[in-house]
Structures are given as C-alpha cells and as structure tokens.
Amino acid sequence: MTAMGATKMHADEISTDVALVRRLLAGQFPQWAELPIELVRSYGTDHDIYRLGEHLAARLPRIEWATNQAAKEKKWLPRLAPRVPLALPVQLAMGHPGEGYPFDWSVYEWLPGENANGAIEDLDQAAADLASFVIALRQVDTTGAHPRPPHGRGGSLAQGDEQVRRSISQLGDRIDGAATLRSWEGSLNAPAWQGSEVWVHGDLLPGNLLVVDGRLSAVIDFGALNVGDPACDLQPAWNVFAGDSRTRFRSELEVDDASWLRGRGWALYQAVSALAYYWDTNPGMIRQASHALEQILADSSA
C-alpha cells in the first residue's frame, strides 16, 4: 500500500497515514493506541495495512468499493477457517468513520509470512497445498451465502467481455492484443459450468497467498468471496505455477477442459484489467499481471 503523498491509484482514493491510524485507535480502541504503528508496503490496491506492534494489523479501505470487505470477512471467515487447511485472517474489531476518515475500518491478528512472489521453495508442493485449500473451500455449505453482485467473481465470463476488450484496446502495442483476444474468445466460448455453485475466493493472486519458511501458510483478502463457478479459483495456475506445478495443480483439482478454459479466462480478465488500470500507478501489480498474461498466452498457444 502507499503512504500519503504517493501516486494515487484511484481517482476518488482516500489517503491515510500513521498519525490518522493513531487518532482512530485513540478514539475507538485506546487499548492499542500506544502500540508502534508501521505502514506495510505492498502492491495491494484497495486497503492500506498498518502493523500495530507485533501481533496486530489495522486495515483501512482506500476506496469506497472496498468498504464491504471487513463485514464480509467478519461473517464468513470464522465459518470457513475450521474447514480449510491454510490459515485465514482473524478479525478482532471493527472501527467506524472518524477523524476525517469516512469508512469503516478493522483490526486483525497479524499473519506472519511474505507473499508468494518468489518465496515458495517447492512449487509442486505448493500446487498440492493450494489445491487442498480450494477443494476444502468448495465443500463448505453455501447456505445463507450473499447474492453474487453483478460482475462478481464466479459468474459468467461474458459479464467481463466488454471490459476485457476495452482493456486490450487501451493497452495497444504494450501487449500482443491479437493473441490476447484469441485466448479470451477461446475461454468465452467454453461450455458453461453445469454443476452446483460453490464458494470461490475469487482473487487467488500471489499477493493474497502468504508463505512461511518457503511453504504456503495462509490465504488473505476475501473481498471477492462469492458463490459461483469453481473455475474462478484456477487463477493460480497462471499467476503462481508453471510447467510441472501447473500440471499438478490441475491434476489435484481434476479440472476438465471446459473449466480449464474458463479458469484461464478469469486469469486473463484479471491480468488485462489490471494492466490497463494500474499501468502508471502500481509497478508491482503490473509485474504480476504481465507475468500472468505471458503464461496465459504461452499456454493458449501450446
């Protein structure tokens, strides 16, 4: 996340800083107000994260469309956590607007680890570990799940068609637009999912996977959590894995050809949308999305 004064990623973004976090804590959670506060550097796009002492973290939405995430996580993560094999965030408190800051915000337990970009020692093992997480998540009862919003992750790829085509056009010669469009249309034309809708994380990118001692340890950022087509959670095949580890991930999840195409479409949708939107403001996201698109196009032409 970026500190106050850095390049903004969104036109109506709210800036935060350490002083604001301390004022918010003093007014709402004084028991934590004297802890050391440090901005956590990352290429995340919708929250500023501040570490509070050794064991806590404050999450402040940067943008209005991210403000429902904490409430969603408060409701669902305690129900999901006992059912999945990797750690999930634990929310301790929900803060409210104050000190000139307009959004609800939250305090979580600090989850140790670094993100999965280059930190995984054994990608084949990671493929098995992450597949086990996805399988377990899919098996959790969906009774009472919130309605999937329009264009929500896990819906029909067709809902993203206009955005993908617009992003490809905006990117011009910065990408291979013709190959990207061919890959997208191949995914778009894949048979639709005919099975039951299941829980999907919706955003299994390297920045949302934590690694401790070289091995996957936790999954964070459930803002895209929905019930939908399980192919949505195949994104790591192109964002995290390659070669044998990609094959292992697919094998562990027993992915049919149509689901593979739809999953690759979700990965492409995320990559080109990010490239078009963050090209000038978020170099870390651009590196990740560029890598993913490269993997997608190589896989599409294989």
Image (cartoon, rainbow, N blue to C red):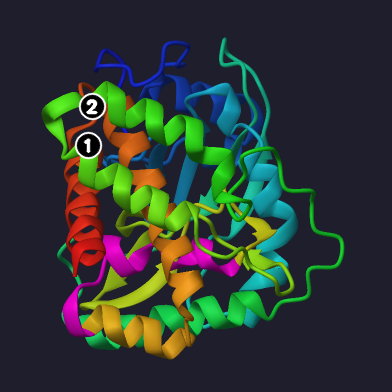
- Which label's residue is closer to the chain start, 1 or 2? 2
Residue 84, horizontal then vertical, whole percent: 57, 80
Let me know if residue 203 appears in the view: no
> Callout 1: helix, strand or loop?
helix
The reply, left or right, for residue 53 in relation to residue 75 is left
Residues marked 1 and 2 touching at CB (< 8 Å): yes
Mark number, residue 247: none
The reply, left or right, for residue 170 in relation to residue 185 is left
Q: Nearer the viewer, mark 1 or mark 2?
A: 1
Residue 180, horizontal then vertical, whole percent: 27, 45
Residue 242 sits inside the magenta stretch = yes
**Quadrant, the C terminus:** bottom left
The reply, left or right, for residue 267 in relation to residue 176 is right
Residue indicated by mark 2:
171
Residue indicated by mark 1:
177
Residue drawn at the location 56% of the way across and 33% of the way down = 66
For residue 218, what is the image quadrant? Answer: bottom left
Report the predominant secondary structure element of the magenta stretch: helix
Residue drawn at the location 45% of the way across and 16% of the way down = 13
Stretch of the chain drawn in magenta: 230-244
Let me know if residue 153 appears in the view: yes
